Image (spheres, grey):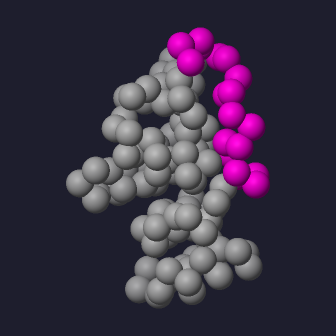
Amino acid sequence: MRAVITRKMVVANDAGSPVQFHPSTADKPFETISDGVFSRLRRAGAAAPYTGEVGAPVPDADVGQGPGVDLDKMTKAELIAHAETEGITVDPSATKAVILAAIKSA
């Protein structure tokens, strides 16, 4: 599928390897990604469906770092990637609960 990337984010691809995405630009308005990768990016508030209009505003109000980012629904790998993107230091060997608490307290 085609997706607009709204902010820098690292998520796992379908094979489980980390992939870094950068915000879409006028020169590259969308990324072609799998539904699974889109789901991970969207849960992290970093993607929206591509509407076909270059420069069009992102249609979803919940995209970004605001209240639409549901940390509780992220996997441990997504939380680690989110922390890295936000500049929050976490121990990758810690439990998901510890990582989640560290992100929420930052």
Residue at 38% from the left image edge and 39% from the top image edge: 35
Where residue 84 sits in the image (x, y, percent)?
Answer: 54, 65
By secondary structure, the bulk of the magenta-drawn segment is best described as loop
Q: Which residues are magenta?
A: 51-68
Instruction: Give the quarter of the figure containing the C terminus.
Output: bottom right
Tell me if residue 43 can be seen.
yes
Query: In the shown orientation, is residue 74 left or right of residue 64?
Result: left
Q: Position of residue 73 (x, y in %)?
A: 56, 64
Q: How far from the left and from the top, in percent, is residue 61? A: 74, 37
Q: Quadrant of residue 60?
A: top right
Q: What residue do we see at 53% from left, 29% from top? A: 49
Q: Quadrant of residue 86?
A: bottom right
What quarter of the picture does the N terminus occupy? top left
Above or below, comparing residue 20 to residue 49 in the picture? below
Residue at horizontal 49 percent and vertical 30 percent from the top: 3
State yes or no: residue 62 in magenta.
Answer: yes
Query: Is 90 left or right of 38, judged from the image as shown?
Result: right
Position of 27 relative to 105 (above/below): above
The structure residue drawn at horizontal position 43% and vertical position 26%, both measured from the top left corner, is 2
Let me know if residue 8 appears in the view: no
User: Outermost residue toward the top?
Assistant: 53
Number of labels in the image equals 0
Q: Nearer the viewer, residue 30 or 76?
A: 76
Q: Is 49 left, or right, of 61 in this rendering?
A: left
Q: Position of residue 58 (x, y in %)?
A: 67, 28
Rendered position, 87 above or below 51: below
Magenta highlight on residue 66: yes
In this view, 100 is above or below 46 = below
